[in-house]
Image (spheres, rainbow, N blue to C red):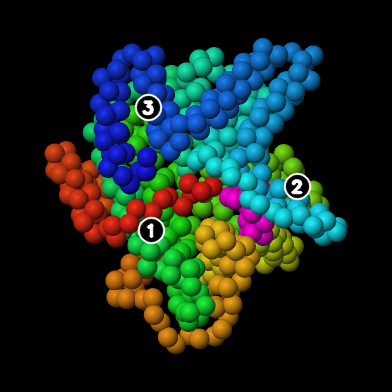
Amino acid sequence: MAFNSLEYGIFLVAVFLLYWGLAKTGTLRIGLLLVASWIFYAASNPWFLLLIWASTITDYWVGRAMGASEEEVHARRRKALLWLSMLMNLGLLGVFKYSNMFYELAVDLSNALGADLTYTKLDIILPVGISFYTFQTMSYSIDVYRRRLKPERDFWRFALFVGYFPQLVAGPIVRAVDFLPQLQRTPYFSKQQASRAMWLIAIGIGKKVLIADFLGVHMAQRVFESPEVLSSLDVLLGLYGYTMQMYMDFSAYTDIAIGSAILFGFRLPDNFDRPYMATSVQDFWRRWHKTLGSWLRDYLYYPLGGGRGTPLKVYRNLFITFLLIGLWHGADVAFLVYGAGHATAMCINRYLRKRRERLGIELKLGVFGTVWRVLLTLHFVALMRVLFAADAYGERENISSFAKAGEVFAALGEGTYTAVSIMTPTVWAILIGSYLWHWTPRSWTEASFHAFRRLPFVVQGLVFGLVLLAIQLLSTGQRIPFQYFQF
């Protein structure tokens, strides 16, 4: 049930009306949201419910069992329970997301040692959202183990934390310490919340349909499907288009998720802060997919030692963290290379920063320096995005992701920067306009929202409906799945 579909709109309105009709009945209210969330998830494949139920039951039981083992004498039991949670969740990821990658690596290694094996891809369907809800439930178990969070005693509340439908499929990644307390409060819904929800949902659908899907159809698909027939300038512009498509697509999902959650009185964390304004790769990861970055920082990077210790240990910690970021995004060696590339850039950033600190050099960028660093970071990110697209497009053509990436880089390096065949006035307008919008100050967007909020509520609803109608009329007519569904 895609966010940009009529089915989701009908579903959201129906659940909203039923929910506030039961607002004063805590158990029924939570039960309704839980059933609605499971129906939403089952729309992709009913069998996937078995996986989310298994994760939910395991981590609820683990949390309760750890809560009953407060004494130090039970430290080993608590650690064993934590390992059970980790093995359960990582095992689900391993089987459904990484089986083919491990199998292919094993075949390649065996053939390198003299065997004569043939790799045949296993027919395993990747459950949507599995990377997101497994990270959520693991963070709960870890927080309970660290005694930073008391175990949730109400199973239905815990189940709703795991499966809450607005953020279930593609985030943002929500932590129990932030979400569970919201379930214990009496819900409250105001006109201001309604205004914010309409604003975010309209912005999100506009980003997805008018920008992300348009750039995907008219730029990314043409470049990645046939890079060899295009000029180097076409390919470069296509990379700009794909880079913006990824941001608009993912941030659109986040906007709609946050707006949908507001309709039920819940607050979800923001996931983006104009990432293509970043002046370094480190700054980029502070702005892009913030909930994943903070999760890996708190549950992997810091426990490994973080920025403490010798430079080699810090660089090791960065590489481990970013290799996992790569693997989280996809079960392909190309994603490991993607993670390694970002880790290398992070290490270079850190080395240069520490060197300036030792020499007592204060970094003063100025306008030119800031623009230069923003453009340099943007181009690094865009080039690394080739590995993202190469995985999906390579699979469609039954070639390896590296072969597809090689085709793109080869076309980019030909040096033909004169002919342009993929750009029309409309494509130019959408591409340039999306970047200009992205680079505008956040205060401008907030000022626009406050102007919308000051309108009479009936007028707000009329504007919201007209905007959705206009988006539908201006759309390409092709419904493209959200890009992060594949992760």
Q: Earlier in the sequence, mark 1 or mark 2?
A: 1
| Disc number placed over residue 485 in the picture, else none | none
Main secondary structure found in the magenta portion = helix
The residue stretch that appears in magenta: 322-338
Q: Give the amino acid at mark 1.
A: Ala
Q: Earlier in the sequence, mark 3 or mark 2?
A: 3
| Left/right of residue 296 with respect to residue 439 in the rendered view | right
**Crowding at mark 1 (Cα within 10 Å: few <14, some 14-19, many 20+):** many
Where residue 280 sits in the image (x, y, percent)? 58, 62
* Nearer to us in this view, 240 or 54: 54
Residue at x 23%, y 33% (from the top left corner) = 191
The residue beneath circle 1 is 212
Where residue 457 sits in the image (x, y, percent)? 16, 38
Say what secondary structure mark 3 lies in.
Answer: helix
CA gap, disc 1 to disc 3? 28 Å
Residue at x 24%, y 59% (from the top left corner) = 474
The residue beneath circle 2 is 308
Where residue 334 sits in the image (x, y, percent)? 64, 59
Above or below, comparing residue 433 to residue 425 in the picture:
above
Q: Give the amino acid at mark 3.
A: Ala
Residue at x 27%, y 42% (from the top left corner) = 6
Above or below, comparing residue 223 to residue 357 in the picture:
below
| Residue 471 visible to an observer of this rendering | yes
* Nearer to us in this view, 270 or 324: 324
The residue beneath circle 3 is 36
Say what secondary structure mark 1 lies in.
Answer: helix
CA gap, disc 1 to disc 2? 40 Å
> In the figure, residue 478 lies in which quadrant?
bottom left
Q: Nearer the viewer, mark 1 or mark 3?
A: 3
Q: Quadrant of the N terminus?
A: top left
Q: Decide: marks 1, 3 in contact (CB < 8 A)?
A: no
Residue 455, magenta (yes or no): no
